Structures are given as structure tokens and as C-alpha cells.
Image (cartoon, rainbow, N blue to C red):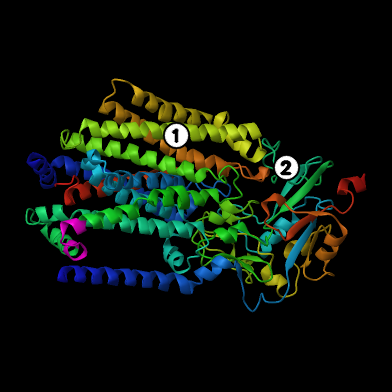
Amino acid sequence: MKESIKRRDFLKIVGIGSVYLVAKNIIPGGAVSTLLKITQTSPTTNSGKRWGMVIDVGACIGCRQCTYGCKEENNIPNIPAPMQWIETFEMEQNEPITRLNSVPSNQSKTSYIESPIHGKWYLPIACLHCDDPPCVKLCPTGATFKSEDGIVEMNYDKCIGCRQCMAGCPYNARSFNWGKPQIPQENVNALVPVRPIGVVEKCTFCQHRVREGLLTKCVEICPVGARHFGDLNDPNSPPSKLLETYISSALLEEMNTKPKLLYITSGKKWFEEEG
Amino acid sequence: MENHVDKILESMENTGQAFYATIGIFGMVVLWGAYAWYTQFTVGMQATGLNNTVMWGLYIATFMFMIGVSHAGIIISTTIRVFKLDKFKPISRIAEGMTLVGLAMAVLSVVADIGRPDRILVLFFNLRIGSPLAWDLIILSLYFASSAFYLLVSMKHDISLITGRFKVRDGLYKILGGIQNVITPKDPEKYENMLNSISIVILPFPLLDSGMVVAFIFSLLGARPALNAPFIGAYFLVLAIVTGIAAIVIVSMILSRVYEWDEIISEEVIMGLGNYLRVGIILILYFIFNQHFTIQYVSKSATLVVSNMLLFGSYATLFWGMIIAGFVVPVLLLILPNRNKVGVLIASVLSILGLWINCVLVVVPALTFPNIPFNWGSYIPSWVEWSVLAGILALGVILYAVLIKLIPIVELD
């Protein structure tokens, strides 16, 4: 009898102890609350804004100035391998945006040399900053999260490099640092952190610029004005006005991710206006 | 029976040159794997063949496979207790050992896959309960803990039998025996009840692991339509259980051969496992047929491309090789009227190779052809990946070999 009481006590201590350890480590980390909501708040993001972008694919000439401007602005490395947050695809004239073709005619559509070419149109894709982002739902540490102003952000210090977010992104918008990124010291933009090795990164909607009242680099640099950025909560912002005027479409709409990067075609395609 | 006990104790006592040679050879493989992993850690994941489109490869496939191996213990030891299948009793502890070693290998495969293994503590302190990876971490930890606990409790009589028999190891047995005396009741009937209760707790773990949380890592990826299917959980469960059965046949046959335990691990046991293996492989073929038939008939492009690449495209050789050599031939071997245990062993070896290739073919093609058609990728594993995996496997062999020396791997009473 004495033996069995001792045993019970031992099991009780082990049981309570382990529950305490689990609870202590998991619950104050905000695990339960982050399960319920994917949005994080902070003083800088609590501005009542909801950032969004509209790209006019009818106007885009595929020059990829946005890609290169973005690379400079955001310290995106060429070493060990070229990386880009904005990919621009060269499309055939009769190709819709979300063509789920079983055999694409041209797989390396981002490596075209000359643009614009008559009869082709161009589709730039970056992180769409979904309102219901699959990457945020999948992330085990909260390294990627949605801010109150709608930007899907990365916390590079929390990323363990499991790449679950990349597997879950329907748009292939995320890149992994397969090696240690190297950028010449004189080219580093001090406002943007240079990423460590082994973490995931992606377009930030130039959060360091837009929260200071500037436009994103890609919008600023676009030579034909195909990109429009602003607050979707403000009916007078450029993207809101365009969305009111034109029929818009989201990439892979059936995924129900509710992207804040939307596409319009304002009238004719660029080559038809010319010709 | 006395004779059996002597034989088993002899296997623990006499550590010959063959044992040290085995440890030495596999130890060198472990060192090689460690070197490869160190390379990967210093230069980054660019040492692998992975890329931004195919971001998971052999490591994750091996994780899935090793979870299957780890189910051996549950399939054998707890089911014989719950369903009273006493004929498999001689191999029950062999299987429990495989659970612990298999889980260790599974965890190592995942650690090899993540880009920042140095940040593993970040994961523990910032765990988001909404992430499938967190569910895996929790369920697999519980699985490991309860399996280890079961092994500890079930060894009570054996440990008390061997305490005092060995010189160096006796301290370990005294500690284990002390713990066992505290946590288990003295009354034999209550002790049996305790073992039965733990078995019932452990029994649903394959369903929770392979059937749910491991499958959820893949099936919750809306961006990969070939994986994002409701049947994936049931399919993974069957894959994992069959892997466990094939693995236990192989390990039992090796032990029986090395230590001449033919009388202990009888032909009847191996043939019985062969019967389950046969049913399992037929179920796998049924799942594969249904998957491809559905995709081909509906021909939705995002899944059709994956199916086409497997059936007729770049993965066809591997796929049909796996179907024929890994599944169809084993089934034929297992329905031969005059089959023997060597036949069952060959079938197990073939099917376990097929099952590992199947894990790779479930993961890789589905990632290679994502939803957006312009970002198709390709993946060829690098020497680093092969070496790290060889190292993990060799480490598993060493762990198991040491385990055999430390505990009676066949129940003594």
C-alpha cells in the first residue's frame, strides 16, 4: 500500500511538472492567440491604412526596371546566386493570366533578353500580400506574419528555414537564402537588413518607404506608369480609383487568398495602341 | 525456454570482433555523413540539390519513411497486447527498439532539412500552434515519450533477472530497476493492467502521426494540388504501417541469422508478418491506381501534369520500376504456395526500397510542377544529401546494435 502511494505521487509530480513546462514554454509565446489570429500589431503599423497595389498589364512593357530597382533598394544579392523578388513573365498574346497549362510552351519566361516584342505581353509577379496568406498560417514560429496595415512581413531572426511557407505559397513568391548573401558594402541600403544565411525572404512592399509616406521603389521607377500603389482603405488613392474604374483580377483567384496585388488592363495592350 | 534465455543473455554477454567491426564500418559512414552535414551547415543549403521551386527533397521524404519504420513497435508490441496475438511475442521488443531508433532517425532527417538548425530553440520558444509543423513536434514528442515509457515499464522482470549478471553495465540496470520499482505496482495483476493501459494509449499513434499530422505537412499545401487531397492521410497511414512491417521482417531476420535465434523467431512469425505485408502492399497499389485514375479521368491540368510526369514523363522509369520491383514482385512472392521465410525477407527488402522511392515520388514531383506553370523546377539530389542520409541510417544501425547489447531484445519471461 505504501509502495503504491509513493508511485502515485511520483507519477503526479512528473505529470504536473511536464504540463507546467509545456504550458510555460508555449502559452506565453502567444501560441494560442496566434492560432486564432494571424495579424500582429505594432505602433508603426497601426495607421488605419491597408496597403495595396494595382498593376496595369496592358501598359507593362516588360523592361524589368522594377526588378532591378527593387534589387538595389532591398539589398537583394547576386552572390551566391541571383535572386529577385519581382519576376516578370513574357506571355503569348492569347495567354490568360492564370493559364494552368499541363505543358507550358516556354518554361524560362523570365530570361527573355529583348522587350517589348510585338505580340507579347508581360506579367510581373511578386508577393501579393494576401489578406488570407497561406504562408503565415503554415509558419511554425511566426517568422512571417501579417501586419495591421496589410503587409505580410518577415522577421528574419525567427525564421528557422523549414521552407513550409515556400511550399504553401501558390505564387512561388518566396526565395530562400541557399547560401550566405553577399552584397558589396558600398551598395548596401542601410534602411533594409541584409538577410542572414538559411532564411526565407520576399517582397516587403518596401515597408521602410511606404510607412514613411513614400511609394514603393518599383512604382517610383516604372517608366510607363504601369504600377500604382496606395491605401486601399482610402477611396481616393490611385489603386482604389483604378479598381473602381476597371475590371480587375487576382492571380489564382480560386485559392481564396484575397491578394492585395491586383491586375487590370486599362484599355488596349501597349502594342495595339502603338500599332 | 531456459535454453532461449541463455541464448539471449549470451548475445548480450559475448561481444565479439564482428560486433566491433560492424560498429567500426558504420561508424565511418556516420563520420562521413557528419562531414557532409558540416559542409551543408557552413556553405548553406546550396550544398543540396534543392531550389526555390523544389524546396523539399530526400530529407523530408526520408522523414516520412522513418516515421513508418518507427510504427513497427506499435504495430507489433502494443497490438499483440491489446488484441492478444501471442505468436508475435518473441519479436515485440525488437519492434519497440525500432520505434525509438526510427523516431531518432526521423528527427535527424528533419534537422538536416531545415536551413537554420542552430535556431532550433527559436522553434520551441515561439511555437505557433496553428502550424502543422508544431502539431508534428507535439505529437511525435508524445509518441516518443510514451513508447520509451512502455519499454521501460515492460522490461521490469527482465531487468530484475539480469541485475547482478554483468559487471560494467550493472549500474545502469540498478538505476532502471530502481525507477521501475517506483513507477510500477508490485501486484502482478495491477502491473499487467498498467501495461495494458499504456498499450491502449499508444495504439492510436500511427493514426495520429502518419494518418494525420505527418500527412498534414503535405496535404495542407493548397499551392500543391497533387498533395492537397483528402485521401493523403489514409494513404500515408497505409504506407507507414507497411514500412513498419517490412522493416521488422528485415531486422528480425538479421538478428535471427546473426545470433542463431531460428527457434526463438520462428518461421511462423515471419510468415505471419508476410501475410500482413501482402495485404498492405495490395492496399498501396489500390491507392496509387485510384489516385492516377481519378486525375487522368478528370484531367485538371495542375494535377494532370504531376500524374503524367510519373506515368509517362521524366519520373516514369523510377515510378514503374517501383511499381513492378517494389510492389508487384513482392506480392507475387508472398502468394507463392510454397513460400518460406527467405521469400518473405526478399519481398520485404524489395518493398522497403519501393516504399522509400514512393516517399520521394510523393513529395518531389508534386513540388516540381506547382500551380503557376512558368515556375517549373527540377531536382537532382547532391552527394551531400546522399551522404547525410547514409550517415543517419548508419547512426540508426549503431544505436540499435548498442541497444541490443544493453537490454534483452527478446523478452526473457
* Residue carrying label 2: A99
Q: Nearer the viewer, residue B387 or B67?
A: B67
Whether residue B98 sits left or right of residue B182 in the image: it is right
Question: Where A98 sits versus A6, above or below?
Answer: above
Residue at (47, 47) in percent of width and height: B48
Label 1 resides on the chain identified as B
Q: Is residue B383 visible?
A: no
Whether residue B200 sits left or right of residue B383 in the image: it is left
SS for dot 1: helix
Q: Callout 1: 10 Å neighbours few (<14), some, many (20+)?
A: some
Residue at (75, 74) in percent of width and height: A213
What amino acid is labelled 2 in the image? Arg
Number of labelled discs?
2
Checking the image for residue B283, the label placed there is: 1
Mark 2 or 1: in front is 1
Q: Callout 2: 10 Å neighbours few (<14), some, many (20+)?
A: some
Q: Nearer the viewer, residue A120 or A238?
A: A238
How far from the left and from the top, in percent, is residue B258?
18, 36
The residue stretch that appears in magenta: B180-191
Whether residue B76 sits left or right of residue A227 in the image: it is left
How far from the left and from the top, in percent, is residue B127?
47, 65
Determine which quarter of the picture holds residue B279: top left
SS for dot 2: loop
Label 2 resides on the chain identified as A
Q: Is residue B56 visible?
A: yes
How far from the left and from the top, in percent, is residue B305?
62, 36
Residue at (44, 26) in percent of width and height: B324
Per the picture, the main secondary structure of the magenta-coloured stretch is helix
**Residue at the bottom extreme of this rendering:** A43
What amino acid is labelled 1 in the image? Leu
How far from the left and from the top, in percent, is residue A173?
64, 54
Q: Nearer the viewer, residue A84 or B347?
A: B347
